Image (cartoon, coloured by chain):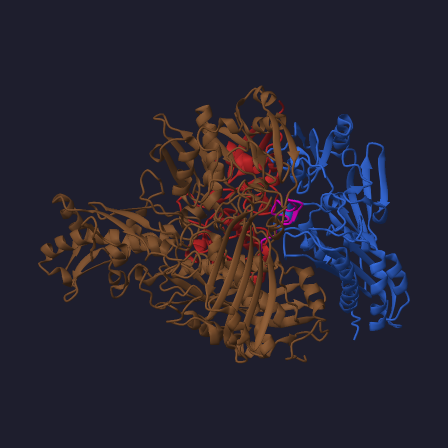
């Protein structure tokens, strides 16, 4: 590693970007664990129903915690009287704002959400009191006896309205939480040089994660004064940080343990802070374990959502489809509290991510984006699979198709013309110097889908002329990592004298497969089998700081850290093996529980033997790795810089049949291609692709948190619709591995990418089929019906006269 | 608007103090009488239990009628088919008799909810829920169904057209009465039928529009002798579009006939704007589309395709 | 406080319990009998993660009063594994086809699949999708679940 001398203090400083990246790309010949579609390590427990989720832990000894909620979207709390509630036998505590021991505020970025509201409430469902009782029934009774006197305030439910001077102020500092801008080149000049200029506005609603497992937190005060909080969660360290402040104790007096999640999708990045802090405050107060388990409706009511947006685009292109200018305005509705919206410098937080991603994966010389993040008296936006990228993809992918139509171009050609290649410069001025497989995904998808033929065959499919077929493309990109200065991952690897391995990381399992993929990387690196590595349940007392399991960062960042940790141990092991075999270290290879001479492979020794000897001789079998990406940068005035160090790329193609008399959509075929650098476990990657696409289809066709005057109308799964097995077609995934320097064996992230281009692919296919362009989601039957009629049912020029 | 505590607070438990499983109809009716309205009849429970949990319904005790004898059969009786009050949607969907002689009913029952719901939910329960778009109400209305209601005072038979009063309300008092039998027309030759459903996803979805169509055609003259069109939820209750039926009676089997009735169907419907189900205007348009399609498909199914 | 006595068969074994009248089957299984394999997702019969078999038919246990199972046979996910620990072919197929991600819908999904295959041993893809249409999955997009059920049907699933 290179050293940089700090001239003033003459101290040696090792800069992190000098980490030898070459070490990371060298894949040994013939991987034996990585790249294999191995069975998940937790599948057996899950299919036999033996894996314990949060609600499966015994309720014995726990008090039941419940939350009293505001029935108003915006109101002052004039007074609150809990005496009647306290008197109910079996009620152990009824708490109000003054009972919060430390900071009465939590939040993943800004702690602006009260644990218990004291002076005012800001959305329907805001917490006004907490109750702990011997049974859930008694706790519910207690809630009913608490008397609160509210003075309703005028409320605001629209981000543009919220920005007006006379809008009701939701927080002291005003309703504009963040304004961010991006300036590249000169859009005025760009538009002047354009042959075609298009202006469009797109609108997307609140979405709900709808993970099947409702939130739950268990707060257990320990005899030694430590507060232990357990539960399903994606970000144990963020939960711990908040608990420490809310309880008013140092971080090392709080312990957080992740329980296996029944789905997260970004929602469990911050909902556990909400239920966890509240359970902990009750536990601290009562001195007893407290369990808060949310009912499904409460999950919808109080936890974070995907940000709704109003996106305005003005785009200019030459006759041949070359993009010359892009001007975007985003009104990003934050809702009542900050959650994961605001900026974590330089490029963290969902809002600035949306701004950066807004122009799409296209080379555009002149770009201007203005993005406003606004509070409203609605439920709040947090992180939901894509973190601000899905929304802007819906806008830019549709506008590309609308542009193609005006220019008379095939949608695939306009994309091929402008799509990122190696060496392209992004809207933030970043040079994509490696791992840019975007056009590879476009070509492979088009080939598998049969784009050229199908594009020509759009038109009626029945002789009654009620159903039309169409095809659509969605192209996209997504970062690996979160773009903050503090992004980094730590891993510990312990090898035992019998060759078994313990792996300690703070990355959590929510179904995406981290608990299989990360041990695979560890096993490959050490030269053992997957079943030899056990990954330890993330516990903040035991695992190193790892950041949250978000941003598609786990495989890459934690994978790199694991590689570094394993190599520390491997050094000792290879040294010992070299002694035992009398072979120089450079000639040795470790694979499949053996260490052998590459030149004479039958000269080998068992991994276990070597390790036992190391142990006997006091050699190091503990490895520690820390990996942080190349530093992110983004100028706050111009939005120029390198916000994220590598991107995953993807192209989706969908075929739909539209019933033009009713607006109903059927998806008849779907192909999705991804450049992910390296698939550590191809079957797990396929699973993420198929599931992500299904989520994107839901966004396109049926998902919407319906709000009226601040009240959610569809709180249960009966009325918040997510796709069933009959709504999703057979999805064909294609995995491409374009060389990437920055990941373990070249791996980039996959978790969020699949659900991003899916939505615009469907919307573009609908428009292609019937001319109906849906610019305000979801494209449910009625919306499609009106969209068709708006354009006078104008039909594509290629007619299939069946 | 005013909201109750229950609109923002949920609990897992059902506030029921007792659960009875009577073995005879008399026993069941006796318990209902004893509790004077504080008891609620439950069969499959797929509507009642969630409503109790959400505090949309309240009851002190439940009277589970699923052990009552002689209520699970599906039989042909002359020109009618007779169902016991405990027949489930799944039984209807898979019954060879119903699939042959009342196909639109089998189709409707097969669309409802999900496999798990269909396995325990009863047709009678679906009718009693009084929902304007119940997947069994619509076909049964088209099939001229009648129901037998048992109470302490005796039995009465009521045509289904008189059964529904308002959204969620029927003439049956589910705290005092039990629906024991349903009977409806068995379709014969020269009958065609069709069941159509519009919803936002393909399973577990409440419908935006449901339409049941029955036609009886005079084969020789190629004229529609009788027609039955049932629609929902485009009014507070599921209903028969009698004016459309009148217009169809005696009309030739032709495209013109079908085109002519769309507008009449719209006039008979009166849906409200709904945030969850869609606008009134759209649903009216869909009535027109569905009545037309329903007729086309029913005629085709009966062997009289309209070219 | 009145109670109800329920005698039924659970995973092949005779069972007799006395519970409060408002007990739902899912809570009887999970909280009273300690069988946590069956999950709770919505308490409305909408998501299907609570699906178990009642006399061989899939039902949503979250909205089924426990008293209803008297005299009947209930099979839960715990009942699928044989005495010697061997997995049911459906369970095996779910593992090998990668049909499990977060695992929360898995018990309900497997039980629905069993109900389907017991009645229809060689279903088409469409019939499989119909058979599991009452269980929501947010993770997998259903594709590998359908493949797993197909694989299980080919492996011979009569148990």
For the point 60% across and 66% down, the residue is A200
Q: In which quarter of the image is residue A605?
A: bottom left
Q: Give the range drawn in magenta.
A: A706-723
The answer to whether B40 appears left or right of B146 in the picture is left
In the image, residue B54 above or below residue B292: above
Q: Is residue A579 magenta?
A: no
Estimate the x, y position of residue A90 in percent, counting from the top left: 54, 21
In the image, residue A629 above or below residue B258: above
Estimate the x, y position of residue A638 in percent, counting from the top left: 44, 60
In the image, residue B271 above or below residue A469: above
Estimate the x, y position of residue B227 in percent, counting from the top left: 85, 61
For the point 13% across and 52% down, the residue is A576
For the point 62% across and 43% down, the residue is A168
Assign the N terminus of chain A to one quadrant of the image: bottom left
Q: In which quarter of the image is residue A479?
A: bottom left
Assign the C terminus of chain A to one quadrant of the image: bottom right
* Residue A204, visible in the rendered structure: yes
Colour that chain B carries in the picture: blue
Instruction: Decide which of A502, B109 is in the foreground and name it.
Output: A502
Q: The red chain is which one?
A: C
């Amino acid at each position: 590693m290179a050293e940089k001398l700090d001239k003033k203090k003459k101290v040696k400083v090792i800069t992190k970007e000098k980490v030898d990246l070459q070490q990371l790309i060298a894949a040994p010949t013939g991987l034996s664990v990585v790249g294999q579609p191995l069975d998940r390590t937790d599948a057996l427990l899950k299919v036999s129903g033996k894996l314990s989720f949060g609600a499966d832990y015994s309720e014995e000894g726990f008090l039941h915690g419940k939350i009293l909620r505001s029935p108003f979207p915006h109101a002052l709390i004039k007074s609150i009287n809990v005496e009647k509630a306290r008197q109910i036998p079996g009620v152990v505590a009824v708490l109000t704002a003054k009972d919060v021991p430390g900071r009465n505020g939590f939040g993943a970025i800004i702690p602006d959400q009260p644990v218990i509201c004291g002076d005012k409430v800001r959305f329907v469902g805001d917490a006004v009191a907490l109750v702990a009782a011997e049974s859930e029934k008694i706790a519910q009774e207690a809630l009913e006896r608490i008397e609160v006197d509210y003075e309703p305030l005028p409320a605001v439910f629209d981000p543009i309205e919220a920005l007006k001077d006379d809008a009701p102020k939701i927080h002291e500092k005003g309703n504009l939480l963040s304004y961010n801008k991006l300036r590249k080149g000169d859009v005025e000049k760009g538009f002047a040089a354009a042959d075609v200029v298009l202006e469009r506005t797109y609108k997307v609603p609140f979405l709900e994660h709808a993970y099947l497992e409702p939130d739950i937190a268990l707060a257990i005060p320990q005899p030694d004064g430590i507060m232990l909080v357990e539960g399903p969660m994606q970000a144990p360290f963020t939960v711990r940080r908040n608990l420490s402040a809310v309880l008013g104790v140092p971080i090392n007096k709080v312990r957080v343990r992740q329980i296996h999640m029944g789905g997260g999708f970004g929602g469990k990045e911050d909902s556990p802070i909400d239920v966890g802090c509240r359970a902990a405050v009750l536990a601290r107060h009562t001195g007893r374990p407290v369990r808060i388990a949310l009912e499904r409706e409460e999950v919808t009511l109080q936890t974070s959502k995907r940000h709704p947006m109003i996106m305005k685009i003005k785009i200019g292109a030459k006759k041949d489809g070359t993009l010359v200018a892009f001007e975007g305005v985003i009104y990003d509705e934050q809702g009542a509290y900050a959650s994961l919206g605001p900026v974590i410098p330089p490029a963290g937080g969902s809002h600035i991510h949306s701004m950066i991603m807004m122009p799409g994966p296209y080379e555009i010389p002149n770009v201007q984006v203005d993005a406003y993040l606004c509070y409203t008296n609605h439920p709040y936006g947090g992180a939901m699979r894509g973190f601000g990228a899905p929304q802007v993809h819906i806008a830019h992918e549709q506008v590309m198709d609308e542009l193609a139509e005006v220019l008379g171009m095939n949608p695939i050609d306009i994309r091929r013309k402008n799509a990122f290649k190696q060496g392209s410069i992004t809207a933030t001025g970043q040079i994509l110097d490696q791992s840019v497989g975007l056009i590879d995904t476009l070509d492979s998808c088009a080939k598998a889908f049969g784009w050229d033929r199908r594009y020509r065959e759009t038109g009626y499919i029945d002789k009654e002329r009620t159903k039309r077929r169409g095809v659509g493309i969605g192209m996209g990109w997504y970062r690996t990592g979160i773009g903050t200065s503090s992004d980094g991952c730590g891993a510990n690897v312990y090898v035992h004298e019998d060759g078994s391995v313990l792996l300690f990381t703070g990355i959590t399992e929510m179904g995406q497969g981290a608990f299989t993929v990360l041990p695979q990387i560890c096993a490959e690196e050490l030269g053992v089998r997957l079943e030899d590595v056990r990954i330890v349940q993330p516990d903040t007392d035991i695992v190193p700081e790892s950041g949250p399991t978000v941003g598609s960062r786990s495989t890459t960042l934690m994978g790199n850290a694991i590689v570094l940790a394993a190599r520390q141990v491997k050094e000792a092991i290879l040294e010992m093996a070299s002694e035992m075999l009398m072979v120089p270290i450079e000639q040795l290879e470790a694979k499949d529980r053996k260490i052998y001479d590459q030149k004479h492979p039958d000269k080998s020794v068992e991994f276990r033997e070597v390790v036992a000897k190391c142990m006997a001789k006091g050699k190091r079998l503990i490895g520690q790795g820390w990996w942080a990406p190349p530093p992110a940068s983004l100028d706050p005035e111009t939005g120029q810089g390198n916000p994220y160090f590598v991107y995953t790329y993807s192209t989706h193609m969908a075929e739909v049949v539209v019933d033009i008399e009713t607006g109903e959509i059927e998806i008849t075929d779907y192909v999705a291609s991804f450049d992910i650098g390296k698939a550590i476990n191809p079957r797990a990657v396929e699973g993420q692709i198929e599931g992500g696409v299904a989520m994107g289809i839901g966004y396109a066709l049926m998902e919407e948190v319906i709000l009226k005057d601040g009240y959610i109308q569809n709180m249960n799964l009966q009325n918040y619709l997510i796709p069933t097995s009959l709504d999703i077609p057979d999805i064909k995934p294609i995995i491409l591995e374009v060389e990437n320097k920055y990941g373990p064996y070249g791996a980039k992230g996959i978790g969020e990418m699949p659900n991003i281009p899916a939505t615009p692919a469907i919307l573009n296919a609908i428009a292609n089929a019937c001319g109906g362009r849906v610019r305000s989601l979801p494209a449910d039957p009625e919306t499609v019906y009106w969209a068709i009629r708006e354009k006078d049912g104008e039909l594509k020029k290629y007619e299939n006269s069946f | 608007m005013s909201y109750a505590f229950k609109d923002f607070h949920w609990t897992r438990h059902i506030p029921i103090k007792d659960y009875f499983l009577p073995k005879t109809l008399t026993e069941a009716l006796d318990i209902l009488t004893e509790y004077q309205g504080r008891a609620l009849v439950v069969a499959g429970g797929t509507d009642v239990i969630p409503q109790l949990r959400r505090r949309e319904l309240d009851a002190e005790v439940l009277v589970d009628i699923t052990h009552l004898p002689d209520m699970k059969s599906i039989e042909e009786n002359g020109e009618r088919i007779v169902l016991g009050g405990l027949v489930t949607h799944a039984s209807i969907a898979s019954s060879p008799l119903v699939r042959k002689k009342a196909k639109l009913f089998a189709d409707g029952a097969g669309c409802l909810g999900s496999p798990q719901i269909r396995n325990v939910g009863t047709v009678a329960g679906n009718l009693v829920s009084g929902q304007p778009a119940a997947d069994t109400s619509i076909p049964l209305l088209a099939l001229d169904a009648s129901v037998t209601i048992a109470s302490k005072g005796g039995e009465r038979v009521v045509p289904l057209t008189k059964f529904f009063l308002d959204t969620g309300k029927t003439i049956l008092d589910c705290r005092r009465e039990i629906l024991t039998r349903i009977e409806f027309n068995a379709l014969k030759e020269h009958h065609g039928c069709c069941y159509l459903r519009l919803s936002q996803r393909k399973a577990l979805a409440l419908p935006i529009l449901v339409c049941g169509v029955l036609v009886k055609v005079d084969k020789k003259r190629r004229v529609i002798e009788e027609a039955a069109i049932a629609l929902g939820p485009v009014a507070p209750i599921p209903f028969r579009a009698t004016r459309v039926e009148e217009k169809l009676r005696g009309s030739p089997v032709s495209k013109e006939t079908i085109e002519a009735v769309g507008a009449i169907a719209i006039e008979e419907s009166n849906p409200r704007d709904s945030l969850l189900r869609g606008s009134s205007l759209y649903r009216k348009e869909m009535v027109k589309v569905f009545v037309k399609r329903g007729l086309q498909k029913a005629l085709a199914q009966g062997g009289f395709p309209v070219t | 406080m009145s109670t109800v006595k329920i005698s039924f068969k659970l995973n092949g074994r005779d069972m007799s319990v006395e519970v409060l009248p408002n007990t739902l089957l899912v809570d009887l299984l999970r909280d009273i009998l300690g069988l946590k394999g069956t999950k709770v997702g919505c308490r409305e019969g909408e998501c299907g993660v609570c699906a178990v078999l009642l006399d061989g038919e899939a039902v949503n246990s979250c909205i089924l009063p426990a008293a209803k199972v008297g005299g009947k046979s209930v099979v839960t996910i715990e009942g699928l594994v044989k005495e010697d620990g061997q997995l049911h072919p459906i369970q095996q197929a779910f593992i090998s086809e990668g049909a499990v991600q977060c695992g929360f819908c898995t018990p309900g999904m497997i039980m629905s699949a069993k109900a389907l295959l017991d009645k229809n041993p060689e279903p088409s893809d469409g019939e499989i999708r119909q058979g599991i249409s009452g269980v929501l999955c947010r993770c997998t997009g259903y594709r590998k679940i359908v493949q797993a059920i197909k694989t299980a049907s080919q492996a011979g699933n009569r148990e």
